[in-house]
Image: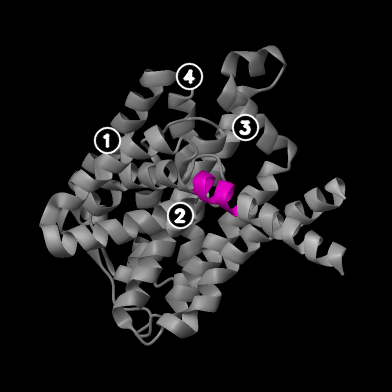
Amino acid sequence: MYNANITRQAAIARLAPFLMVAAPFAAYPIIRNNPYLFHLAILYLLWVVLGQSWNIIGGYAGQVSFGNSIFYGVGAYAAALLMANKGWSMWAGLVAGGIAAVVAAWPFGALTFHLRGAYFVNATFAASEIARLLALNLKNITGGPSGILLPPVYMDRTPFYFLIAFLAAAVTLLILVLERSKPGLYFQAVRESHDASEALGISTKRLKMLALCMSAFFAGLAGAFYVYYMCYIDPDIMFGLPVNSTMILVVTVGGAGTALGSYGGALIVTAIGELFRNYFGGAHLFAYGAMLILVPMFMPNGVSGAIGKAFRRIVRKGVSALDCIVGRE
């Protein structure tokens, strides 16, 4: 009986990731007639993709990087320039944005993965700032502070909604596969102890580069999506510190190293950010700082860890109650 209960509980728990992935598609009929909620839902899913992309390198591989805005920006600028100058379609530009971000990840990783700890964090932050300054000053290519303005791709937001929902589902399913694969286990080994992993013969640099390329690809896709959706980018929007810090905040609040953490983290960050911006101006930055302090103190595994614990408790009680009813019959 006990083993049967454990099996049923595990089977129900396994459904949670797939329900979360399917939720945006199921929610479409509810929110499509409200333009404001529809726009917020798209931004929410964009932060899910960005959070999941950072989660691969930071949550699973344990490399706390402030450089993911580089890949976000490179993907966006590559997609925008190819459409503006070469007439590429949005779909070709999306793929090109992801590939351009991976190309940018190679020198980034080669230069920074020799460092560890605070030195690595500082190096990635410096690299993102260098990228921002380059974008500001290469006016003939990037438009400088004026940025790049594109014509609307679609007048209706529905294609963008389903596209970003698909990207969120794709990166989440990749993470679920990683959790059960040998590279994913190696990522977690490097995160727990870099020196012990090397002592066991694990090629840590190669693994970190693999994690970085996966992370960069989805960050580049997200950047390309952003420019096609918003039709405008500039260096501060794409390479600025707020992008990096919000990615990390989404994962920290939701739960680093978990497949569903970014969903909860992005929901909280989007909701609180919008609420504070509407009613308290720039006070959303204060709210973000408070979350960075309070969530790790009271919920070490993030919101997803707390919700998962509560969900398992409810499932356990529900299965036990069902067994009692069946037993009486």
| Residue position for label 1 | 130
Label 4, secondary structure: give it: loop
Label 3, secondary structure: give it: helix
| Residue position for label 2 | 264
Q: Going 57% across and 38% down the picture, which residue do you hit?
A: 211
Q: Position of residue 139 (x, y in %)?
A: 19, 52
* Lower sequence index among marks 2 and 3: 3
The answer to whether mark 2 and mark 4 are in CB contact below 8 A is: no
Camera-near label (2 vs 3) is 2
* Lower sequence index among marks 2 and 4: 4
Query: Between marks 3 and 1, how big is the CA–CA gap?
Result: 28 Å
| Residue position for label 3 | 187
| Residue position for label 4 | 114
Query: Between marks 4 and 1, how big is the CA–CA gap?
Result: 19 Å
310 within the magenta span: yes
Give, as a three-letter code, the residue at label 1. Answer: Ile
**Image vertical order of residue 245 relative to residue 40, above or below:** above
Number of other residues with Cα within 10 Å of mark 4, as a class: few under 14, some 14 to 19, many 20 or more: few
Q: Going 58% across and 55% down the picture, which residue do you hit?
A: 172
Quarter holding residue 124: top left
Q: Position of residue 67 (x, y in %)?
A: 37, 37
Q: Looking at the magenta stretch, what is its main secondary structure?
A: helix
Instruction: State left or right for residue 124 relative to residue 96.
Output: left
Q: Going 36% across and 36% down the picture, which residue do you hit?
A: 66
The answer to whether mark 2 and mark 1 are in CB contact below 8 A is: no
Where does the magenta region start and end?
304-311
Query: Between marks 2 and 1, how big is the CA–CA gap?
Result: 32 Å
Q: Going 49% across and 77% down the picture, which residue do you hit?
A: 27
Give, as a three-letter code, the residue at label 3. Answer: Phe
